Amino acid sequence: MNPKMNRRKFLGNTTLLGASIAAGSVFAADRASAPRKVKVALIGCGGRGTGALSNFIDACKILGLEAEVVATGDAFQINAENAGKKYALPSEKCFSGYDNYQKVIATDCEYVLMATPPAFRPLHFAAAVAAGKHCFIEKPVAVDPCGARSIIATGEIANTKKLAVVAGTQRRHMLAYLRNKALIDAGAIGTIKGGVVQWDGTVPWTKTRNADESNASYLTRNWLNFTELSGDHIVEQHIHNLDVAVWFLGRLPVTAIGYGGRARRKTGNMFDFFSVDYDFGNDVHIHSQCRQMSGTYQRIGEVFTGTDGTCFAGGKLSGKKVEIPEIKVDSDNGQVQEHVDMIRSVITGKPLNDAKSVAESTLVAIMGRISAYTGEIVRWSDLMSNEQSPFYQLTCKPTAADFEIGEVILPEEVPPTPGKA
Ligand SMILES: NC(=O)c1ccc[n+]([C@@H]2O[C@H](COP(=O)([O-])OP(=O)(O)OC[C@H]3O[C@@H](n4cnc5c(N)ncnc54)[C@H](O)[C@@H]3O)[C@@H](O)[C@H]2O)c1
């Protein structure tokens, strides 16, 4: 779109106006004051981690900076080295083992990108902030309430140290979502009365155990199918849609009542599907639905119904005409834009800090999982304030620390039974 268009637009049923991809030159001021080289390191060198590193490098280019990759870390040496090869990193800067994060953080990196399975995030994030690093933390950021509360606490430390913390909830950096959020805040659909958020898809992948493989190695490789490592797919994947609900509504759910089950999955201990009613108070309910089952109908998205209209969060909004300021992004890729926003926030001395919001969205997903696994109603207070609740201290084992000290007991490969779990 033309960056010279009017700064304010009237928006209505078709709402593509009032939003644009910013031309690089718009941010020339950033470039004048920015250092040329930005040192970055990666912990967790799988699909998303290597993708995030490449997104970070693209973000640096947009801002007129040059990224220098100074270290990689992974549980497995081969993964750390493969990720490093692309950037001509010597193998002594590619760290492995479950203490790899300590070695990565001990380098002179300014930014650490964390994309391990989420069970490791609270430990790694705390270490990175203690060492004074700006952090990109992939979602979800924990698998249990203790882990999520630890992220919030570490986020507060990051605040006092003026460190940036940006989460991989990329919808919050995408033009279509930003625009619709602004329109809703301006009253385009009136008051939100309810909605549906969905991630109905397929099983991304499963891995089987190799002969003579250790528990630690098997769990690490097949992490996506174990609740203790991934949080289950309601947390690991559907968090994206729940995060949009929390963001658009601007508040947290009071209770969750859910159910789910398993029909097909062959490894691990997760459910195949969940259906959760989230009560956001004031008679507003959001239905959350997620399924990982190949061969079934697929839909991913969020829809909200208001007193004056309807909004598909990343798409069409039908409602009243309202006026919002023009919204600019630098990239049409939210996974690049989130890094642009992080780096720019550091350059301008106003570091973003997503720790609390992403930890809360992680907890919302965990709330639904606990309800489905147990068959109980779960209150937000059970996870955040009521220390007498059986769910408050819930810790999934093995923990990240167990991996580091080498005491990894394999969880049973059976899903929970509601009413008995
Ligand atoms: N924002 C998004 O759209 C998006 C998309 C995909 C994945 N993710 C998230 O990114 C994270 C990684 O997912 P992925 O798809 O890259 O998984 P992956 O399995 O491809 O990669 C995970 C990597 O982490 C390594 N690892 C495991 N334990 C480790 C440890 N303790 N220390 C260092 N490395 C360790 C693994 O060996 C592997 O290389 C997850 O939290 C996932 O939910 C986000």
Image: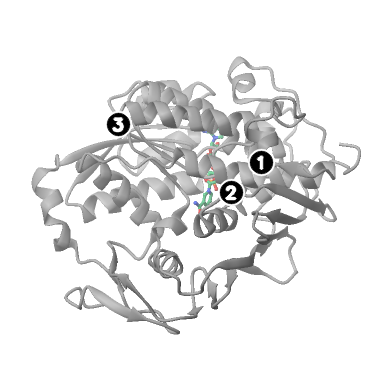
Q: Residue at x 66, y 35 (%)?
A: 383
Q: Quadrant of residue 334?
A: bottom left
Precedes in sequence: disc 1 or disc 3: 3
Q: Nearer the viewer, residue 379 or 316?
A: 379
Q: Residues within 10 Å of mark 2 (few under 14, many from 20)?
A: some
Position of 290 with respect to 7 (left or right) is: right
Precedes in sequence: disc 2 or disc 3: 3
The residue carrying mark 2 is 252
Q: Position of residue 36 (x, y in %)?
A: 14, 42
Contact? badges 1 and 2 (CB < 8 Å): yes
Q: Secondary structure at mark 3?
A: loop
The residue carrying mark 3 is 162
* Ligand 1 lies under 8 Å from the Cβ of mark 2: no
Q: Secondary structure at mark 1?
A: helix
24, above or below 236, in the image: below
Precedes in sequence: disc 1 or disc 2: 2
Kind of residue at badge 2:
Leu
Q: CA distance from mark 1 to mark 3?
A: 29 Å
Numbered badge on residue 121: none
The residue carrying mark 1 is 380
Q: Position of residue 206 (x, y in %)?
A: 70, 48
258, above or below 126, in the image: below
Q: CA distance from mark 1 to mark 2?
A: 8 Å
Q: Say whether residue 111 is visible.
A: yes
